[in-house]
Amino acid sequence: MSLPERPIAFVLAASNHCTMIVNRNDVAVHNNFAYGVGHQILSTSSFDASEVSFVLRLLTLRRRYFGDGVFAIDGGANIGCAFDRMGSSNARLGQRAELRGAGNRVLRAGRQSRDQ
């Protein structure tokens, strides 16, 4: 049986967030403006970098004014970029920081586990 020739959609990309499997066809163009998760990651190595930076600054300020024990929920968790960045900066947020993302993933002190 021969397989049909077709372009490969999914590629492994080393983004600023982490290594991700990205659909290179995830792009839409409207009025000369291109958008899409895959497009952003393959074009800029990150997804919504300004929003993620804002969340990290907000969590840092929360810790500065209220102390350790920062608790954050990435409710959208489209692809986990904010969740991943919050986890990698967890050491700055304090030892008791706890971050929750979609799929009930929990990061405690930078380590990922399943919440029971």
Image: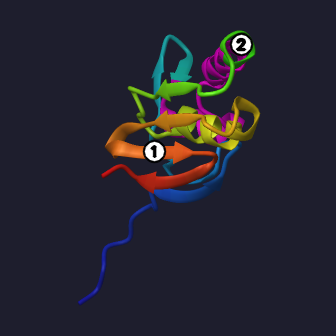
Q: Residues within 10 Å of mark 1 (few under 14, many from 20)?
A: many
Crowd tier of the residue under label 2, counting other residues whose Cα lies within 10 Å: few below 14, some 14–19, many 20 or above: few
**Whole-percent x, y for residue 31 in the image:** 50, 10
Q: CA distance from mark 2 to mark 1?
A: 21 Å
- The residue that appears at 71% across and 42% down in the rendered structure is 16
The residue shown at (65%, 35%) is 46
Residue depicted at x 46% and y 55% = 113
Q: Quadrant of residue 62?
A: top right
Three-letter code, disc 2:
Leu
Q: Is residue 52 magenta?
A: yes
In the image, what residue type sits under mark 1? Val
Q: Give the image location of residue 58, x and y in percent.
A: 65, 14
Q: Earlier in the sequence, mark 2 or mark 1?
A: 2
Report the residue at 41% width, 34% height from top: 78
Q: Nearer the viewer, residue 93 or 83?
A: 93
Q: Element type at marker 1?
A: strand
Q: Secondary structure at mark 2?
A: helix
Outermost residue, bottom side = 1
In the depicted structure, whether residue 83 falls above or below residue 108: above
**Is 61 above or below relative to 22?**
above
Range covered by the magenta-colored residues: 35-62
Extreme-left residue of the structure? 1
45 within the magenta span:
yes
Residue under label 2, please give it. Answer: 61
Q: Nearer the viewer, residue 72 or 79?
A: 72
Q: Position of residue 56 (x, y in %)?
A: 67, 23
Residue 69: image quadrant is top right
Residue 21 locus on image (x, y percent): 51, 55
Apparent side of residue 76 relative to residue 112 in the rendered image (left or right): left
Disc 1 target residue:
106
